[in-house]
Every structure is written in C-alpha cells, then in structure tokens.
Image (cartoon, helix red, strand yellow):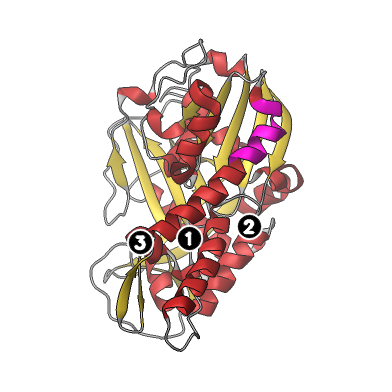
Amino acid sequence: MSTPIYIGNDQGYYGTKVVSRNGDKFLKMFIRNMVVPNRVGEITYNNDPHNIMYREKEGDPEWFVGKLAIEQSADDELFDSHERRLFSPTWFREQEYLIMFRVSTGLMLQGISGSEPIVSVALPTDSYIDYKEELKRRLVGKHSFEVKQGNMPYRRIEFEIKRENLYVISQPMATLFHIALDREGQLLNEDLFIQKVSINDLGFGTSDVETLHGETIIKRQSFTSRHAMINVYQLLSKRLTEFSREVDPDKTGKEYPIWSLNRVIRSGEISFKGKVYDVSEIVSSCTQEVGTALVDEVWNRLDFADDITYIILTGGSSIPFKSYYRERFGDKLIFAEDYGIDAQFANAFGLCKFTQSKSKSVPLKNQQEVAATIQEEFSVPSSAEKRVNRSGKGGGKK
C-alpha cells in the first residue's frame, strides 16, 4: 500500500520553499532558486548537502542547483535568470523550473519507500487563471533523474505525480489556508470564509492582492513590478550610485546593480575605494518610500478597507513593510508570521495543509527517516492553530 506524503511546493523568485507532512512530522526545506549548467567539469566538494547537482542519467548534461548554482554563476547569468523569472508569467515552461521542482520534491520523498506524493503548487495572481492547466500538464507524470549532494555519489530519484494528486492554486490563497486550516487540513477559522478578507502576498517582484467574500474570490489584483521589494532594490541602486559620486574625489562613482545589494541591505554598509561607509539611512529611506507607496496603493484599491474585516499580510517581503500596514490598517491586520512559522514559509505550509484538506487519506506513522537531506523538521507551535478574533483583531503581535 502506498504512503501518501502531502507536499506544498512554493517556487518563488528568491527561493523554493517546501513543506511536507510525513506521519506526525512536518518537514520544511529551503533551496535558493537558481539552476545553471555545469560548465566547469569536475569540481571538489565539501560534504554539504546544500551543494546539489542534477542530471537525467549518467552521461547527460549536469546542472548546479541552489547555493552551488549561485556560487558558480556569473553576475550576468544570475541576473538573466532572475529577470526571466521575475517578468515572465510562463517561467514554469523553462527547464530550470522543472529541475527545481523535481529536486525539491524528490528530496522530500527520499527515504520513504512506496510513497505517493500529493502536491500543491501556486502561481502568482495575475497568471493563475491563464496558466494553471498548462502548469498541471507540465508537472503530471513520472519524474526520473539523479541527484548528487556534497561529496556523495549520484543517486536515482523516481516519483510519479498523478493528475488527481496535483493541485494548483493562487499564491495568496495558500496563506489563507495556512491560517484557516489546522495541521490536519480541517477548517479551524470558519470566520475567514464568511467575512470579507483581503490577502496581501508581498514577494520580491510582485505584490498580489486577492479579496474574498465567503469562498468566492471577488477581485484579483497584482501590482507586479510597481510596488514590491524589487523597487526598494532599484531605488537603492540609484541612490547608492549618487552617494558614491558625492564621496568620490574623481566624481565618477560606482554602479550598484540590484543583484549585488543583498549584502548591503543586511549590513547597511558599502565599501568604496578602500573606505567603508554607513548607508543604513539610505536603505531605510528607500524601504520607507516604497512601503508608503505600496500601502497607499492598497488603501485606494480597497476603497479604504471600510467593508473589509481582515487584511492578511504574507510573503517573504512582508516583514520590512509590516509597520506601514499596521499604521494604516490597525487591528484589521493579520500577520501570517504570527501563526507559527516564518512568513516566507506561510504559502508552502498553506499548500501542504490544502493537500490534506483535498485528500481523504490519512498519512501512516513511523516511516523511515530521510537520510542525506537538507530538510529541517520543525514543530508547529500552538500559535499556528489559533482562532481569528471576530472583533476584527488578528490576535497577532503588534
């Protein structure tokens, strides 16, 4: 008898987040969303399971996946991949998407004999209707490939995605299921399916807003590339170039492409011509400018949210914009991270719960542990299963 394994696979701009349920355990996994061909031949590994290589079979072209792909790719190659992913609604047609899906799903199934994956994936709001059936056709069927982690030898991974075991929903809806369903996939917060609710899913390149009344989606809106985290990066790139010219005796300055800014945003510093400069105020002002514009846009599109009971804020980029949402929407705000796990995993966890809600099967207990894995078991705290306050308060942290 096959063992159903419930998987939520959320492939985003920056990373692929996967949550699975195997017996009584929830597992989560994060892989940087980058896949590039191996153009260097034999390389020396350390025993890090995050160093991943992929091939169809021996003798076929090899691909670097995740962290290893980031390290092996040139800046222009990295930017090209990110740009195609960011601005193409049909990114799932690319070979890189399929490889990332196979690797991330396959690693979740390793060590579980006779498993039957039941998988949910998500599409951005503005491409969900047009492409959900095509994405299903892309993923349904048998997947057979080989994966190498660290200095271990290649091993073959095979699994089959049956059509009846694959679900495609919109990304904001995944977070709704994260909050509305308990860990068994049963309805916990019925109020969210009765009241008028707006789900704001803030990613790197898109800020998607879906408004529901009951179980009916009455409005889908996407602010793709208008008010999103990428705009912070674009604005910061411009401001840092201006700053470098001001402090440069030669007044030539330096260009700061957006793909180089992660370190700057984390540290608040730049190194320029042998000196280190504190640019934390510039980073903060760029975040504030974009965050304020984003909240103004949402405020106007939702007609001041007068008839909306809850605003659910989710997505990997929701954290830097949380304070602007709280100031504008007050106690209507429900922050996904207050419900048990990191905001970047809210969609993946919701997808995992959704697969359980759609299946009548109950996963078997005491399955074999996964070996040589980058999965991370996590406990689901009680805060992940709390009821939404009907008075309009999300019950989360202020």
Q: In the rendered image, which residue does mark 3 sit on?
A: 268
Helix, strand or loop under label 3: loop
Residue 386 left/right relative to 60: left
Q: Which residue is mark 2?
A: 92
Camera-side residue of 380 and 364: 380
In three-dimensional space, the C-alpha distance between marks 1 and 3, rounded to whole angstroms, equals 24 Å
3D distance between C-alphas at marks 2 and 1: 13 Å
Between residue 35 and residue 54, name the one nearer to us: 35
Q: Is residue 75 above or below residue 367?
A: below
Amino acid type, residue under disc 2 in the picture? Phe
Q: Residue furthest top?
A: 391
Q: Residues within 10 Å of mark 2 (few under 14, many from 20)?
A: some
Q: Is residue 155 visible?
A: no
| Residue 250 image offset from top left, x and y in percent | 46, 89
Residue density around tag 3, few if under 14, some if 14–19, many if 20 or more, within 10 Å: some
Q: Secondary structure at mark 1?
A: loop
Q: Residue at x 46, y 84 (%)?
A: 39
Q: Position of residue 190 (x, y in %)?
A: 54, 14
Q: Residue at x 72, y 48 (%)?
A: 131
Report the amino acid beneath label 1. Asn
Query: Quarter of the image containing the C terminus?
Result: top left
x 47%, y 35%: residue: 352
Q: CA distance from mark 3 to mark 2?
A: 35 Å
Which residues are the magenta region?
A: 295-304
Q: Along the polypeptide, which appears first: circle 3 or circle 2?
A: 2
- What percent of the width, then of the height, locates residue 84? 63, 66
Q: What residue type is disc 3 on?
A: Gly
Which one is closest to the eye, mark 2 or mark 1? 1
Q: Nearer the viewer, mark 1 or mark 3?
A: 3
